Structures are given as C-alpha cells and as structure tokens.
Amino acid sequence: MNTNDQAAIRFESVNYVIDDIQILKNITGSFHKGKITTLVGPSGAGKTTLFRLCNAMKSPSSGKLYIHDKPIDAYDQVELRRNVGIALQNAPMLPGNVRKNLALPATLKGEVLAEEEAKRFMHIVGLKESLLDRNSKDLSGGQRQKLSIARTLVNRPNILLLDEITASLDRVSQEEIEALIKQINQKYGTTIIWITHNLRQAMTIGDYTWVMMEGKLIESGKSSLLNNPKNDKVKHFVKGEVE
Ligand SMILES: Nc1ncnc2c1ncn2[C@@H]1O[C@H](COP(=O)(O)OP(=O)(O)OP(=O)(O)O)[C@@H](O)[C@H]1O
C-alpha cells in the first residue's frame, strides 16, 4: 500500500467458518481510505460474506478486522452505522412512501429527518423532491436504487459498501448510478467498496480491485490488473466473464 494511503478497512488473517464450512480463508489486505475498490470473483467466492463482517452482521472466526485502525469489536452499533453504510442489490423498502424510507436511519435512532434534509438527500442522488410522497413500491428499479443510496447517506457514513447495486438495472440507470457513486466518492471523500459481476464496471469505476475465489483473496491492486492478471485462475476468470 502506498504510504500516502491509509486503510479504511484492514483485514489481518481473517477466517470465517460456519457449520464446519470455511467460507473465508486467511484474508489479509486493506481497502484504501477515500478510494473506490471493486470486489469481483465467481459466485460463492465469499464477497457478500466479507461485507457482512465489515458491517458487523457477522464476526470473524479468527483474525483481526479494523475500521479506520480501530478493531471493529471496539465500535458500538451507532458508531459503526455512522462509519459503514451498506446498499444491497434488491434495495429492500418498507411499505409506505419514499419519505418514510429515506428517514429510516434517523427513525431508528429516535430522530426526525427534517424536510430540508430529506430534500437535500433527494437532490444529492438526483431524485425529484416530488417523489417524497410517492409510494416506494411504485419507483422504477433505478429510482429505488438511488433511494437506497440516499437512505444510506443519511447516516453520513465514511465507508459505503455496495453489493451488486446495478445488477438488475438497464444500461442507462447503471451508468447514472456509476456517476453518482463517483460523485459521492469525490465530493465527500467517501471510501467505496463495490461488489460487481460486471468487469467493465469493476475496471472503469475502481481505483483498486480485489479478486476473490473460493474464499480467498487471490489478487489485488490497481483495477487495471484485470487487463493483465498475474494469477492463472484470475486470467481464466476474466476470460470467461468477457467471452
Ligand atoms: N450461513 C451460511 N451457511 C452455510 N454456507 C453459507 C452461509 N452463508 C454463505 N454460505 C456459503 O458461503 C459461500 C460464499 O457465499 P457469499 O454469498 O459470500 O459469496 P459471493 O461471492 O457473495 O457470491 P455471489 O456473487 O453469488 O453473491 C457460498 O458457497 C455460500 O453458499
């Protein structure tokens, strides 16, 4: 890692085992602070499980995990939510309108999201204010995903985990979300970790890329590594995805 770069998240020999199955195997590495890291690999490689460790939904079976140089188990839940936000592929919504869904992180803390703030978050993600009163089930896939991102921003996380957030979107919505995430990264310095099956996306959006396979971190570095991987398994994977 470049000496100018600090780690937003650092893994030291992290293992995760459930029901005698080793899902993550000796993961050591860092996600650079303020950068975009894309996370790729075949289905079942352990990418989502890695995210579950980063937002403390699961705990490592062994090894150490640090968020901004502080062990993850030293954070309380509220503090962790303020640091690490997550958005998921299906952007799950509560029944009710957009305003209610956007305000959820505030509501969970017993706070109220002021109307001006709600409008500001809608503006940041490029959604019209008039959608605040719309039932969230009537949003398009792209709008729903933008709302999901806006909702995550309400906690002002300095690390954002994105799990396949454009997988079910058409190309235009995909590119809108890509531009939005780049903008959030640049404007707020938010560290972004983005799981994607789309290698074009992984290369164009990422500063850095991790390639995971069978629970292991096989190769990592600048995202251009996908153009010319060193590891034979990664070469094979990239070739298979592109063809
Ligand atoms: N609770 C669990 N019990 C048993 N096995 C699990 C559990 N959770 C995940 N796994 C297994 O761990 C492996 C890694 O799963 P994970 O969802 O992290 O992979 P992934 O790389 O995110 O895959 P995808 O790209 O398909 O989402 C898979 O083989 C999965 O079946």
Image (cartoon, rainbow, N blue to C red):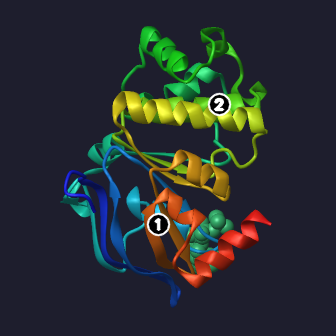
Report x, y in % for residue 57. 44, 60
88 displayed left or right of 17: right
62 displayed left or right of 214: left
Q: Name the quadrant where ligand 1 sits.
A: bottom right
> Viewer-nearest of labels 1 and 2?
2
Q: Is residue 204 above or below residue 151?
A: below
22 displayed left or right of 3: right
Query: Does ligand 1 reach within 8 Å of label 1's beta carbon?
Result: yes
Query: Does ligand 1 reach within 8 Å of label 2's beta carbon?
Result: no
Residue count near mark 1 (Cα–Cα under 10 Å), binned few <14, some 14–19, many ≥20: many
Kind of residue sitting beneath label 1: Leu
Q: Secondary structure at mark 2?
A: helix
Q: Is residue 166 above or below residue 235?
A: above
Q: Secondary structure at mark 1?
A: helix
Report x, y in % for residue 153. 44, 32
Residue, far bottom? 20
Q: Residue at x 50, y 20 (%)?
A: 124
Q: Which mark is residue 176?
A: 2
Report x, y in % for residue 101. 57, 29
| Nearer to us in this view, 192 or 109 | 192
Q: Which mark is residue 50?
A: 1
Which quadrant holds the C terminus? bottom right
Q: Residue at x 37, y 80 (%)?
A: 61
Q: Is residue 167 above or below residue 13?
A: above
Kind of residue sitting beneath label 2: Glu
Report x, y in % for residue 50. 47, 66
Q: Residue at x 38, y 27 (%)?
A: 187
| Nearer to us in this view, 123 or 147 | 123
Q: Is residue 52 visible?
A: no
